[in-house]
Image: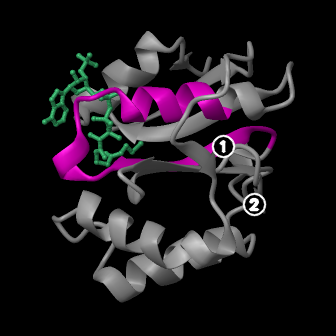
Amino acid sequence: MQLTLVRLAGPSPQDSPGVRPIGECDLEGVGRLYAAAFPGGEVGDEATAIADVRASWDGEYGEWLPSASLLAEVDGRAAAAILVVDSPPWDDVSDLVFIIDLFTDPAHRGRGLGELLVRSALAAVEPGRVVGLRVEDENEGAVRLYRRLGFRERS
Ligand SMILES: CC(C)(COP(=O)(O)OP(=O)(O)OC[C@H]1O[C@@H](n2cnc3c(N)ncnc32)[C@H](O)[C@@H]1OP(=O)(O)O)[C@@H](O)C(=O)NCCC(=O)NCCS
């Protein structure tokens, strides 16, 4: 079953070293990371994943929010990313700022990068906006992370 989780944006934490907005020149690297993070083929092969990240950047899934769509780098290499849009094209969530995806390189998991990116993205969203995402309930690690950061099921 798919859950729809939401949370109010903010408050603003301090800037985090190693975390920066995704630039156009990062799209290929982020796409590669996307494919590596879902090795079961959920997002297709590398080329498909890169095309999907570019489609997100181009606004196919809502207005790309550059200040909240972030890349975490470890030793100068892409290690985790969060993709965030405003007004996604799905009726039940079209009023939200929406986390399209969050993913960490399998080699860098469990070190807090996912949490850091969600916190940093929340801090970059206009206060008062509600931030949402979809996650499979069986994705227990991700659900736990979001719940810990205050996300709750939408009533
Ligand atoms: C969900 C995901 C983004 C979390 O990224 P992360 O950088 O590992 O996140 P964090 O380190 O902040 O926290 C991950 C949790 O997994 C634990 N963990 C420890 N070692 C781990 C490992 N090797 N692999 C995965 N999780 C690990 C962490 O301790 C933490 O557990 P807790 O919530 O009980 O404290 C990452 O697992 C991932 O990319 N999954 C595949 C993509 C996905 O499902 N994304 C969510 C879509 S909504």
Q: Is residue 66 above or below residue 136?
A: below
Which residue does the numbered mark 2 point to in the structure image? 62
Residue 75, position in %: x, y?
35, 51
Q: Which mark is residue 52?
A: none
> How dense is the environment of label 1, judged by Cα within 10 Å: few (below 14), some, or many (20 and up)?
many
Q: Is residue 64 magenta?
A: no
Split into quadrants, the picture shows ligand 1 in the one at: top left
Q: Residue at x 57, y 24 (%)?
A: 119
**Earlier residue among tags 2 and 1:** 2
Quadrant containing the C terminus is top right
Which residue does the numbered mark 1 point to in the structure image? 98
Q: How many marks?
A: 2
Q: Is residue 140 above or below residue 21?
A: above
Relative to 128, is 59 on the left or the right?
left
Residue lying farthest to the front in this orientation? 75
| Residue type marked 2 | Gly
Range drawn in magenta: 95-121
| Residue type marked 1 | Phe
Q: Residue at x 25, y 36 (%)?
A: 139
